[in-house]
Image (cartoon, helix red, strand yellow):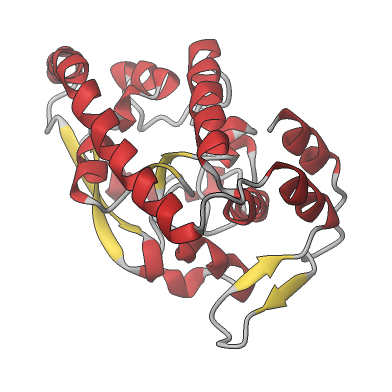
Amino acid sequence: MIQLLRDFKDMKSNGKPAVHVRRNGTLALLDSPVVKLWYERNREPHLNNEIYLRIKRTLDVLCCLLLLPIAMPILAFCAMAIKINCPGPVYFFQERTGKGGKRFRVYKLRTMVKNAAALREKYMHLNELKAPDFKITNDPRVTKVGKWLRKTSLDELPQLFNVLKGDMTLVGPRPSSYGAHTYDLWHTARFELKPGITGLAQVCGRSELLLDEKLRYDIAYMRNMSLSLDLRILLRTIAVVFRGEGVK
């Protein structure tokens, strides 16, 4: 995986990437010699896609069940801190786009003031990314506790319940808040997979990446997904969060 990340970061992109579109016209895949070569060297030929997905789902459920006894006291502590710091609900529910472009409700701990959605238009001129992405360094809508939750990624902890429901998986493309219609055709490759709590893009820059860069990592993951790659991404996620890199 380390070699994949190194090679992938070294790739030069002039405009939109070369793509290969499947016959049904609904899915575009990144056509990268680097990714193809890595895949041939590291793929797990003894697992076909169907078996891999079944094992992945089983491991998702088992991991969530094992983590919940640890996660519940942490969630209780975070809920108390949110309530003390800023009036409003503890949890934040948002519609995200998942597998097949289907919308679903994602669970998060609230990190912003209660009227954050209404204030977005007010601060739109401070947006540092190209629409539809939205990011402001030191976003004034984020609470003090919210900054800590984002830095530690504890705001994502309730998504263990999304995984148990089957809307998400532990490792996969992060679900976006905007609809499938906002994507370019080659972007839609990510809808082939369930969205994940973490993914290849999250261990390669997180919020520092532009939309197109995130999508290239997502498609690279789709082309090379395996149990060993999932494990390495999970381990790298722990390291990234522990170091506080790429705060969202």
Q: Position of residue 17 (x, y in %)?
A: 78, 64
Instruction: Locate the N terminus by quadrant.
Output: top right
Left or right of 163? Residue 23 is right
Give the image quarter of residue 72.
top left
Residue occupying image coordinates x 57% and y 26% = 246
Q: Is residue 148 above or below residue 133?
A: above
Residue occupying image coordinates x 51% and y 22% = 235
Left or right of 85? Residue 155 is right
Q: Position of residue 124 (x, y in %)?
A: 48, 50
Q: Position of residue 131 (x, y in %)?
A: 56, 58
Left or right of 169? Residue 61 is left
- Pick the residue in front: 87 or 65: 65
Q: Pick out the residue farthest to the front.
A: 46
Q: Is residue 145 above or below residue 60?
A: above
Give the image quarter of residue 22.
bottom right
Residue occupying image coordinates x 20% and y 43% = 164
- Pick the residue in front: 121 or 31: 31
Q: Is residue 109 visible?
A: no
Q: Position of residue 183 (x, y in %)?
A: 54, 69
Residue occupying image coordinates x 63% and y 33% = 205
Left or right of 126? Residue 1 is right
Q: Is residue 189 visible?
A: yes
Q: Is residue 223 above or below residue 74?
A: below
- Pick the residue in front: 185 or 29: 29
- Pick the residue in front: 46 or 191: 46
Q: Is residue 224 above or below residue 246?
A: below
